[in-house]
């Protein structure tokens, strides 16, 4: 399977507080990538950059932030996938070539990067990372065109796949969204300066105004001369990732022309319509399932209850003291409330089931807390196909919906009295996508582009 | 005002995994104290102890935990109050005196500690800390009694105030709850071994069975010979801290013979009964206000909505990049959802207002997100008096309910269209406390014990 | 064997740069203790203190130094002995008792501390550390006298042993040297302010003038009223530790009325007189043996050569990568120079042999580098008795001079062609001590005071 | 001025303890570079690498060393020059290109690297660092030759300058010394495995046998098939850096067919011959001046004394507590011994004077300690020209020998009664270089190669 690059990006041009605002913006996009993060800034002709492994709050200690100067900046958060957790692959990624200095921040996946990389190496190129971003930059510097925009166009038209990219040069901030519009990219304005963000929650935090989404296939070029749009690519059918709405994006973001939280509530309502159940209470696996559960509860008129409490102190630093203690760890993050659950018939609404192992564990703790019946309802269809556009699903055979041949068997595996998924049509209807516009490949295998299943492995270990 | 010791305690006797279980238990009691924590263990005659500043997950790195050995252990988390954040004041606190080694973990406040300390110093005692716990130990070693239990009884009967204390010696785990029963202390059992915890959520996490609450004025002595109860004190009227139920304890805990989350829902229902409002939605300030808001919503039959989203990445490490940026920081923790709030009449349910400054800020962000009307409802009466039993309220004059002479003025200050508090009677009724049993001093100034208003300041700074 | 407290002290009164000068002073006294260090300062009535494990340069990071304020300060460096390397035992050690705040820094050993401690515990005292210093402070606060000086006199006259102590109160810096004068204490002056230091190298570094040594049995009391001397003790025969001159003190210090480096050169000359040898070159084990070797070379007129080179990068952080690699580690610190040693007859001058194991290893590397003959000469007599006054010799049976019955056997063990020690008389003559004045107990077992061989072990581990 | 790369290298092929031995080897070469260090290993086809800023002991913590596996390894230590202290420029530096993985460790300077780099960039190359090493690798991958050795030959013959390079591939360790032989490279053997090191002190530490020096212009290729030599370059006049012998190399190393310590003693003797003085004692500025001072003393028959004592605790962590304190800091590293110097006529022998500022400070402390007359003797001629081959002299105008027009003026500036330098001829004679063989460009400006004075500055800052 191709390498996943699930990430969030932030860019701002010509603002006195560019660095601080980028820091805040990345903070609000942290859910899009916890592995590494970085900020690059231009101060005149000088690029400054700080990348690091870890959360935004860990990498950008106060004095380090002060070392970054400039009115133009881009930032990046990156997702953790096993094996490639190395600092070299942190972004933004910058090069200097002759007089050109450019830094790139990238969310998504090139589906033809292996082929491009081989061709470039045969022509003498040396790659320092395994990132798709570096391929784009090699194409860029090898373009014979004079102008940066033309070089960029020449490079990008050779790339296939799903991506949102930001480029920062000494005099420009450029944002590109692939022609299918798989990943989101939003344009905002803060005190007259343009801002580009993966999700609008980053605009909210810095009190920036939401202008519009960047169009699929659009390149926006922001400079001292203002903003202009270019369309370098042939038009393609819009195929926004519906999983952003179901699970990945923050509930308070507004992307793909909709409010994420409200889409989730509508998914819950639709789910209740399609698959009601007789029960005393409706609950969620917090916090991601909260919104669909509330929608479900409203529709079916069974009260929503907080049946599980989330521990706010849980972080990545928790130590499982020993093998024997591991079983207790399960309840560190989410503790079921016995007084609420005891003797009750419970509907548990969850946004998705991937491997099924976490769900199994959660259901067991609910059962142990005294629930009499458990009816599980899922606000997306069964996930059966890998994603080549940036979502890190496990391999096909690890997906529970492929492992087991029926929903009944899955229900038995995870230990619920009944299990129902929303239908593909129901989901699209709730997402206002009846007329298409969404990529649903993970549910039905219909990929909008050609896909390449060969992986690139890093030859270096650190 | 007297020094606050707001804390959580955990103790376990004769269990092979005593250290690991104490670590987990403290993790689940983290909300009772984020400043410092510690674990003391006995392995035969040898006491091992590790205290540190910071969260449980920060202090107990893996190999450090391994250094602690023993089948008996006590642990402690401590609350942060300005000025005394020093490692010396971290607990458990241990002494060796002649042949006796004893470690203490303490939650609460002695109201006569200044007097006791002066008397002891005049008799040659040297104090190393400003903790009440040390006073108890000096009294203990100066007792002429032969037996540890008798020494303890002699020491404790000289102490006044509100406290829960655990003592660990080489052959005993002792738990004491003051005669008023101000702070909670619960007894559990794990694989046949006794456990003492501040709240039952610590029992849940380690899969221990809840046996019962330790009675006000009861001393439980756990040893190889099993458990026995002693009552050293004269009987006093039960006065459990109602603020534990309103705000402080974890919602999934069961203390003072009730489920915390369900008390909060009942407070919300009662609040709706007493102070309904006309609105489109009911929301909370997450997460502490969630339960009262849900109860309010159910009673008044106006839908509960997630109008604010909590950022899970917020920790103590967030850097305000600069003064100018501070205003943005407000929304880092809680972001209002514009699509939910725009043009709506909103009821905001909150558990309490202390200084009013945080509430003011939250209300402003809700207003800025487009709410048309905001009606605030508070699930406890106005807080007007300091707590001498462990809750760190600010000084009287900083309490908004003292600063401003009417609820109307407070409503204007925080910027809401209406503001209502639950009544004292309503609160007690919801908490099933009609017949008394609760300390309500912070609301009405009726303290169950004599109180001493002189502070002890540390002469040392680190 | 009694607990060792081998340390260095520094104190300064009424100087604007008191903290910075104490920091520098401790830096120059680092050789007297590498385990822990600390500084205590008084700023009006407020004591500030910072102690830590590690070297002065590690503990006092820049901003930490800034947190210490005041014109009066004492500092301490402490020696590492197995088992007691805990932060609690770092000094200075301070107490507040009623209105009195006092901090103590201590070098030496009380020989009756176990007895005193037991007596105090029976009277209700609680000890927090295993340090002798704490005993002194308990005696002090229990004195019925009115005045600090009288309390101090009453406390100190109950103590036996060898010690140099500094006391800092809000209005006084007090220095005490035991009546035997075992450990050094020097008085200096910096810009009119008095300074007390273990060795004069600390005066050199801060450009302070050397005034005089504090006399055995003298107490100097420095206050706003200037300096005064008190003699609380009965006069005793002067018994300064000759091992300070032989090995322990810095070569550039001037203590016990002599220049350390020049004493060592005279010891080398005397050694050459007593035990000449036929050889091509004279060399030392650097750096401690350099001075005796140079004196030896001058007297015997055989050239001094640098036969071993010391690696300046060696620190406490060196990792022995594996058991197999350990043998190579030997040469990391000191590498013999093959081109200098090959085929040569070599006289190796060393200041002392304790266990013999390190010497054995060094001699082997010299032999492997090609030396044809090795004649070892030692500038002190065989060490056969433990020190109860602060030097951390191993137990009697580990001393090579006790293990093996003749110098010949020791020579064979360490692998040299001949081995000779300076005589006790020769050593005393070279140290200008013919008429007595030195403690030579480690060589001949004649202790100037009663000694107590029982150890105090800490009941706590961290 | 060109960028300096002053470094040390270590390589070993086919040894079970390759990683540990490389770690030890780098430890002994630490004086050649304190800024950063790294180790690269091959384990089959997999390259593992760990680079870091700081000393060897800081970067290679125990568990980190364990992560490196393999029987073939190269290591590198790098010198600190202002502005380029970034982790990206740490070595070894590795690339993967098609099937080839190669890591390089480099000591020295390419004098035509700017030109080569420009040419490569125009052909589409992207550089990640400012290191000359990366230029070599770009040339290598662009070679059309089939075989690694031929590619290497084609790359290296395009390079000009002074360098020692090690290359590690999956089946080879290659060492190259430039045709002038400016920097040293020695071949050793450890348990039958070949070792390549900058200086023999690295062989001593790991108990390896010294085989021979690699010849100027020689390439040694070590593989499973043994060792073979290639000569890719036209023969050039040998021009070994005499400053390695004077100051830079470790005194216990044997390079350029001589013992460094003994060359320094001969320089001291020659200096005494050329420039005797009337005095009471001869002393050095320790430790680098020790050997020339001892040679001088022996020749002139005036006793060598330790007039200054070096503090072993001085590290890079020393904090100057404040501007006012800075003057005291001078004596932290080296303290003059008053008792030795007072009233004496002193000859101070030093290896070199560069800026003169440090010397000035040292002389002042000697004078303040009481020296009556100070006669300074320098064991190299005045340094007047920059080094383009790796030694980091300051710019021409900062060199004191250029700033002041006569030796008399320099003597006055640094505050000595007389100042004399060894003559160029005397130096060469003492170094056995009468017949040439040394680069003396820093003294007389005669560079063996063409030199390029343009600097490469990094466009990136971290």
Image (cartoon, coloured by chain):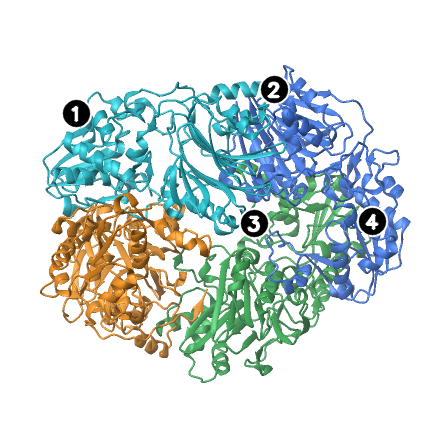
Chain colours: A green, B blue, C cyan, D orange
Q: Which residue is mark 4?
A: B402
The front one of A280 and D341 is D341
**Does residue B345 show up?**
yes
At which x and y percent is residue B159? 72, 27
Q: Nearer the viewer, residue D24 or D225?
A: D24
For the residues labelled 2 and 4, the Cα–Cα distance comes to: 53 Å
Q: Is residue C224 left or right of residue A436?
A: left
Q: Residues within 10 Å of mark 1 (few under 14, many from 20)?
A: some
Rendered image: mark on residue A316: 3
Q: Which residue is mark 1?
A: C408
Question: Do the residues marked 3 and 4 share a common chain?
Answer: no
Residue situated in front as seen by the camera: C431 or B334: C431
Q: Is residue D126 above or below residue D266?
A: below
Look at the numbered discs 2 and 1 and tell me whether their residues touch, using CB distance below 8 Å. no
In the rendered structure, the residue with mark 1 lies on which chain? Answer: C
Dot 2 and dot 4 residues touching (CB under 8 Å): no
Residue B224 numbered tag: 2
Dot 3 surroundings within 10 Å: few (below 14), some, or many (20 or more)? few
């Amino acid at each position: 399977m191709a390498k996943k690059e699930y990430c969030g990006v932030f860019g701002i041009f010509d603002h006195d507080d560019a660095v601080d605002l980028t820091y805040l913006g990345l903070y609000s996009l942290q859910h899009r990538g916890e592995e590494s993060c970085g900020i690059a800034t231009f101060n005149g002709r000088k690029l400054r950059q700080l990348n690091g492994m870890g959360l935004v709050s860990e990498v950008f200690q106060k004095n380090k932030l002060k070392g970054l100067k400039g009115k133009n900046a881009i930032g990046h958060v990156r997702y953790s996938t096993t094996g490639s957790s190395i600092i070299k692959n942190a972004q933004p990624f910058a090069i200097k070539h002759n007089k050109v200095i450019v830094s790139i921040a990238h969310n998504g996946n090139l589906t033809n990067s292996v082929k491009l990389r081989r061709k470039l190496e045969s022509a003498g190129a040396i790659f320092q990372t395994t990132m798709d971003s570096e391929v784009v930059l090699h194409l860029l510097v090898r373009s014979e065109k004079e102008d940066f925009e033309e070089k960029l166009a020449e490079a990008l038209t050779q790339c296939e796949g799903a991506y949102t990219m930001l480029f920062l040069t000494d005099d420009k901030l450029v944002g590109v969204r692939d022609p299918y519009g798989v990943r989101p990219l939003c344009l905002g304005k803060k005190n007259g300066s343009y801002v580009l963000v993966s999700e609008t929650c980053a605009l909210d935090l810095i009190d920036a105004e939401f202008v519009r989404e960047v169009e699929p296939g659009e390149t926006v070029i922001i400079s001292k001369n203002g903003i202009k749009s270019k369309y370098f690519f042939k038009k393609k059918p819009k195929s926004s990732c519906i999983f952003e709405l179901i699970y990945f994006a923050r509930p308070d973001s507004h992307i793909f022309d909709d409010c994420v939280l409200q889409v989730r509530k509508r998914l819950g309502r639709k789910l209740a319509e399609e698959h009601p159940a007789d029960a005393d209470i409706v609950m969620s696996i917090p916090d991601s399932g909260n919104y669909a559960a509330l929608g479900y509860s409203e529709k079916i008129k069974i009260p929503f209850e907080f049946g599980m409490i989330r521990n706010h102190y849980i972080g990545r630093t928790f130590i499982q003291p020993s093998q024997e203690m591991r079983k207790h760890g399960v309840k560190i993050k989410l503790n079921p409330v016995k007084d609420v659950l005891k003797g009750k018939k419970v509907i548990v609404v969850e946004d998705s089931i991937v491997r099924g192992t976490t769900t199994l564990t959660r259901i067991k703790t609910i059962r142990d807390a005294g629930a009499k019946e458990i009816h599980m309802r899922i606000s997306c269809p069964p996930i059966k196909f890998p994603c080549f556009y940036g979502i890190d699903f496990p391999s096909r055979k690890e997906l529970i919906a492929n492992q087991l041949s029926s929903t009944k068997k899955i229900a038995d595996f995870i230990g619920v009295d009944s299990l129902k998924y929303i239908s593909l049509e129901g989901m699209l209807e709730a997402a206002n996508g009846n007329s298409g516009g969404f990529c649903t490949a993970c549910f039905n295998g219909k990929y909008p582009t050609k896909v390449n299943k060969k992986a690139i492995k890093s030859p270096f270990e650190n």
